[in-house]
Amino acid sequence: MNKKLDQQAADNIRALAVAMVEKANSGHPGGPMGGADFMHILYSEFFNYDPTDMEWPFRDRFFMDAGHLSTLMYAQYYLLGNYEKDDVANFRQWGSITPGHPEVDVKRGIENTSGPLGQGHTMGVGAAIAAKFLQARFGDWMNHKVYGFISDGGIQEEISQGAGRIAGHLGLSNFIMFFDSNDIQLSTSTDEVTTEDTAMKYEAWGWKVVTIDGHNHEEIRQALKDANAETEKPTLIIGKTIMGKGCVTADGSMFEGYCELHGQPIGATGADYAKTMENLGADINNPFDIYSEVETFYADIIKTKTAQAAEKKAEIDVWKAANPALAEKLDFFLSGQLPELDFSAIEQKSGVASRVASSTVLGYLAENVENMIVSSADLSNSDKTDGFLKKSHALKKGDFSGGFLQAGVAELTMAAIANGIALHGGIIPVVATFFVFSDYMKPAIRLSGIQELPVKYVWTHDAFRVGEDGPTHQPIEQEAQIRLLEKLKNHSGKSSFLALRPADAAETSVAWKMALENTSTPSGLILSRQGIKDVPAQGDSRYNEALGAEKGGYLVKEVENPDVVLIANGSEVSTLVAAAEILENENGLKVNIASVISEGVFRLQSKAYQNSVIPKDKPLFGLTAGLPVNLEGLVGDNGKVFGLDHFGYSAPAGVLDEKFGFTGPQVSNQVLEYLKAYNN
């Protein structure tokens, strides 16, 4: 080690962070200045990766929680050769690859889109779970570490409780997190908002905790050595740091530890930009230069990391040669491909709730997809993910041979963990809860969409028919919220989410097929609590007909030249079938019925196909158990949607159907009233 070079490297990181924010006139310089020492020691001495192969599956991973400290990462990775000078000089600018909060860019070392505070380190917990899962199946040689970096804000976000509890409970000894504890937040000092003992809190969750001087390189080194040697617990390194470490005023006096250094260029604070850069050893005329000795130092580090990775790869090659079947399986897991699955062979009972049909599919998947982790927020026997659990077993400390994560009551934590599992790679994550509780998951669902992660969400108890539980548990507006994500494009230009609400058991099998085959975006299955009368088959196979759902929407009942086309998804489709019988038998009308499981997918079909299912020159009537907006885009200006514009009430499901107007006879009357107005 070279104390002088170590200090120069840390100061170089500080200077780069300061310069980026100053040039952009936007950002957070103080935190990166405090965390620079830890980052330098971590990456120069402990972090294992291959600079020539950044996507190497068995690399260590770094998950940034405090996304506003993006300049800390960009500066560090610039020293490592992952960014060019122009990249850091164009921080936060249009078209740059250095946005204000880091976005997934594995080839440059960015493992996660940080998002709101708390989610970054929770995704790290998910990645650590994924690594343990794979290690249990392929051997202890798979011993890469997952590092997290968290700030006071992340520690305070409620999600940190779920992440801390689960990581400790599972004994994630491969997860090491640095807490940049500088006692300063954006608008206050931390003592104005909390007096908790963070160390005791994490120790109570089962973590190994050590508190160090976050600027003392020897203490950082020792903490990381001990953390890497730990075999039973995750480690929290509480680094006591100074906000704006190295800042000085115009007269050269120190100006550190002030709140104002957190979220604005230091030139707009009591510190002086030029004097601070000078204090850090930078050339004020060339603020984005790497110091010459630091550049040479890091060139050697890159060579060392490359050589170490080559040794590890050789070790893995020996294992692969000795274990060809396992090696083939591992490669298949990492490919993201699915094994051969025959969804038509899944025997579904008639008249079951779609959550029960989903359970049957999950039982099939438990026996046929080996790299799947299913999780439930303490509802496995109600959201019916126990169909998977009964053919697997829960992940436990010291035993990751199972495939079920008992997350406890922590919907947001569970969803963020699933994002981390997906980011790690090699595993298909599935998470489940009641649909109304998707509200608790929305921040992580949004990050699933932004990061284009194939997480599978299972939401049951999909409508007011939850019944006696009352309005708090009855989703009304949730479907509209989720379906908005189908209308929102990700940066690849695709719909950011796939929302699927199947009409019966056969469509549920198809919905699972669609979700699993969707490997580029998250998917959500919206499932009923109550039994649903199966949609009558028009031919020999209801399943084969339900494959029409793969186009987003199709006709489950079709006649020539219909008088009206009825449109729905989910359990309302069977209600339309009952209404259509009345309209045909008692009113002499010809009726088509469209099941539109996903408007997003339906809109991707040809205009001709869309018009064949929902013709614009026919009366169109939609039925939804949620807000009318769910179907208004499909029926158009001349159509009519019957839905709800109020919260639910507590009563048996059948009573609510009657009170709200969702029985076959009631709907047939609504259709007749609509046709009367339409024809006039």
Image (spheres, rainbow, N blue to C red):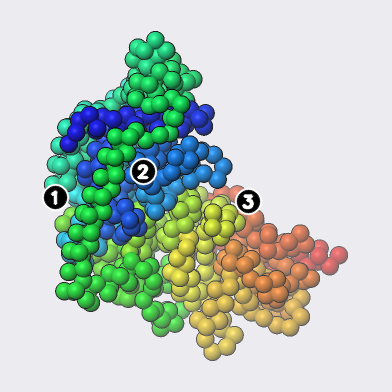
Give me the residue at 65% from left, 61% from top. 631
The image quarter in which residue 558 lies? bottom right
Q: Which residue is mark 2?
A: 77
In this picture, residue 657 sits left or right of residue 452? right
Check disc 2 and report its element: helix, strand or loop: helix
Check disc 1 and report its element: helix, strand or loop: loop
Classify 10 Å Cα crowding around label 1: few (below 14), some (14-19), many (20 and above): few
Give coordinates of residue 387: x percent, y percent.
33, 69
In this picture, residue 229 sits left or right of residue 357? left
Give me the residue at 29% from left, 34% from top. 293
- The quadrant of the image that shows the N terminus is top left
Check disc 3 and report its element: helix, strand or loop: loop
Give me the residue at 53% from left, 78% from top. 547
Where residue 231 is drawn, which disc sits there? 1
Where residue 645 is drawn, which disc sits there? 3
The amino acid type of the residue labelled 1 equals Thr
The amino acid type of the residue labelled 2 equals Tyr
Give coordinates of residue 388: x percent, y percent.
32, 68
Looking at the image, the residue that sits furthest to the bottom is 540
Instruction: Give the total of numbered labels.
Output: 3
The vertical placement of 340 against 390, above or below, is below
The amino acid type of the residue labelled 3 equals Asp
143 or 96: nearer the viewer: 96
The image quarter in which residue 50 lies? bottom left
Q: CA distance from mark 1 to mark 3?
A: 55 Å
Residue 506 visible to the viewer: yes
